[in-house]
Image (cartoon, helix red, strand yellow):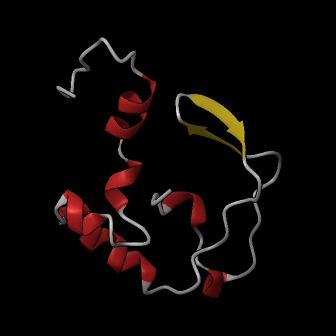
């Protein structure tokens, strides 16, 4: 999971934990997360995640966080039936 948004606010802003049980959509189904998302360790991860937005898919795979992974097209692509094309042309 490269989406940086669940890991905000960054740790230097102060301690933060999510409340409740976290679920992730993995391999076509919702699964209870084995462990919660941790805060970004440093503020430096935020600008790096923005660079990931403009990177190629291959390069983006090297980033720990990539802001492009938070876009609505990610949710639509993950949830659409395999025999359908989304409005994003996936």
Is the C terminus in the top left, top right, bottom left or bottom right quadrant?
A: top left
Q: Residue at x 71, y 82 (%)?
A: 14
Left or right, residue 70 beside residue 5? left
**Residue at horizontal 36 percent and vertical 71 percent from the top:** 49
Q: Nearer the viewer, residue 26 or 45?
A: 26
Q: Residue furthest right?
A: 20
Point out residue 62 in the picture as x, y percentages from the top left corner.
33, 72
Picture coordinates of residue 54 (x, y %)?
18, 64
Q: In this rendering, would 75 be left or right of 50? A: right
Whole-percent x, y for residue 57 in the image:
22, 57
Q: Is residue 33 left or right of residue 56?
A: right
Question: Where does residue 25 sit, x and y in percent of width and height?
Answer: 57, 37
Q: How many marks?
A: 0
Give the residue displayed 41% in from the left and 50% down from the top.
70
Which residue sits at x=76%, y=59%? 35
Residue that extends furthest to the front in the rendered view of this protein: 27
Q: Is residue 83 above or below residue 2?
A: above
Quadrant assignment, res 17: bottom right
Q: Nearer the viewer, residue 17 or 81?
A: 81
**The one of 32 and 10 positioned closer to us in this rendering:** 32
3 vs 25: above or below: below
Q: Furthest residue to the top?
A: 83
Q: Quadrant of residue 44?
A: bottom left
Locate residue 41 relative to residue 20 in the image: left or right. Answer: left
In the image, is residue 53 above or below residue 47? Answer: above
């Amino acid at each position: 999971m490269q989406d940086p948004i669940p890991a905000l606010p960054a740790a230097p802003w102060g301690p933060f934990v999510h409340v409740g049980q976290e679920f992730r959509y993995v391999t076509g189904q919702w699964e209870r997360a084995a462990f919660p998302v941790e805060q970004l360790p440093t503020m430096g991860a935020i600008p790096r995640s923005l660079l990931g937005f403009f990177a190629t898919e291959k390069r983006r795979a090297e980033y720990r966080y990539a802001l492009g992974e938070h876009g609505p097209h990610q949710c639509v692509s993950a949830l659409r039936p395999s025999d359908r094309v989304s409005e994003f042309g996936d």
